[in-house]
Image (cartoon, rainbow, N blue to C red):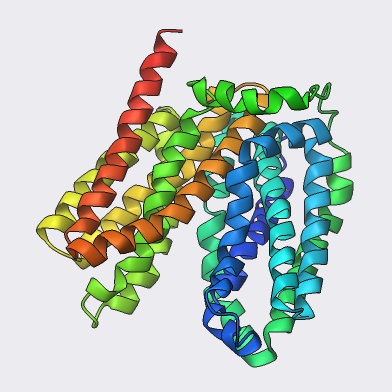
Amino acid sequence: MTGSWRLILALWGAGLGAAMQYAKISVIYDLLGGVYPDGGVALGWLVSVVGGVGIVLGVIAGLLVARIRYRRALLGALWLGAAVSVGQALLPPLPAMLALRMIEGVSHLAIVVAAPTLIAQIATDQQRGLALTLWGTFFGVAFAVMAWVGRPFAIWAGLPALFALHGAYMAGFALFLSARLRSLPQEGEAPVLRWRAVLASHASIYRSPHIAAPAFGWLFYTFCFVSILTVLPPFLDPSVRTLVMGAMPLTSIIVSMTLGVVMLRYTSAVNVVVWGFVLSVLCMIWLWIMPAGALACLALAGAMGLIQGASFAAVPQLNSSASTQAQANGAMAQMGNLGNTLGTPVMALALAGWGYVSLPLLAGLAFACGLFLHLFLARRRGKM
C-alpha cells in the first residue's frame, strides 16, 4: 500500500471533512439566529470553540495520537465527528450545541494530526512533496465547497439536512479507510506517555528548531490568511469585489499545487516557505502603495499558496520519525488555531483605529515575523 494515491486521496478527503467542521458553521452563521433567536454573542462561540480546543490541546494531541496510534485515532475521530454531526442535526438547545461543538473540536484535532502523519508515512519519496502540498489545500477546498454547495443546500433543505449530510460524509470515510488502513505495516512501538511530562513536552517541542519550525511559520500564515479574506472586501472596488474574493482562495490553491510542487523538486520545503513569506511581504508593500489593488490581491494569494502547501511538506523533511512528525503536526494545529483565532479580531481592531493602512502594515509585519523566524531556526539547525 506504500505510495497508494487512492489511499492518500482518501486521507485528504478525511481532512476535508475535518475542515468542514469549521466551514459548515461559518457559511450558515447568519442563519443561526433563526434557530437560536436569543443566542446573541454566544453564537460566535459556535465557530470559535472548535479552534479553542486546538489552542489548548494541540501539542497534547500530537502526543496522544502517537500513543493511541495514528490509524486508531483517525478512525475514532471520524466516527466521533459523524456522531456529533447527527446530534447537531437535532438542533439541540444552544448550551448542548456548544458542548457538541467542543467535542467536535477533539475530533477535528485528532484528524488534522493523524492524517498528514499517515500521508507522510504512506507516500514514497517522490510522492511526498505533492501529497503534503495537496493536504495543505484541505481548508481552502472545504470552505469553497461549503460556500458553493453547502450553504445553498442548507437554505434549500434546512440546517439539519446539512449537519446530517456532513455526518454521513464522515461515516463514509471512516468505513472506506477502516479496512485499508488495517493493511498498512505496523507503526512500531507506541511511545510511553507520562502525564507529568506533558507540560514539559511543550517546551521541548517549541525549543526544537526541527519540530517547531513549520508551526511557527504556520502561526503567521493563519493569522493573515483568514483575517485578510475577512476584512478586505469593503476596501475592494465593488465592480471586482466578488470576482477577487472568489479568485483569491483558488489562486492560492492553484499556485500551491503547480509552482509550489515544481519548486519542491529543486529545493527544500523550508526554502519554498521562505520565498512565500518574502513574496507576501512584497505584495503587502504593493497593497500599501496601491490600496486594495485587484492584481496585488491575487499576487498575495499566490504568494501565500507557496506557504500553504510547503509548510506541511516541511514536517517530514525536518522530522524523520512518525512520533516527531505527529508532534510537529500537533504544534501546527495549535499555532494554526491560535492564528485563526487572533487574526481577524486583531486586524479588525487595527482597522477601526487606523483605517486601511493598518492592513498592509500589520499583515506585512506578520509575514516578516514568519520569514525571520524560519531563517533564525534554519540557522540554528545548521549549527547542530
Q: Where residue 108 sits in the image (x, y, percent)?
A: 68, 53
Taking the spot 81% from the left edge, 72% from the top edge, the residue there is 86
> Is the residue 101 above or below the residue 130 in the image?
below
Taking the spot 36% from the left edge, 52% from the top edge, the residue there is 224
Q: Where residue 216 sits in the image (x, y, percent)?
A: 44, 35
Taking the spot 73% from the left edge, 64% from the top edge, the residue there is 99
Residue found at the far left of this picture: 289
Total numbered labels: 0
Q: Quadrant of residue 279?
A: top left
Q: Where residue 93 sits in the image (x, y, percent)?
A: 74, 79
Taking the spot 61% from the left edge, 48% from the top edge, the residue there is 54
Q: Is residue 124 visible?
A: no
Please state if 81 lies on the left or on the right of 343 as rendered: right
Please state if 94 lies on the left or on the right of 74 as rendered: left
Quadrant in which the N terminus is drawn: top right
* Closer-to-camera residue (116/127): 116
Q: Is residue 329 visible?
A: yes
> Is the residue 152 above or below the residue 314 in the image?
below
Q: Where residue 214 sits in the image (x, y, percent)?
A: 48, 34
Please state if 153 lies on the left or on the right of 206 as rendered: right
* Closer-to-camera residue (298/328): 328
> Is the residue 31 above or below the residue 64 in the image?
below
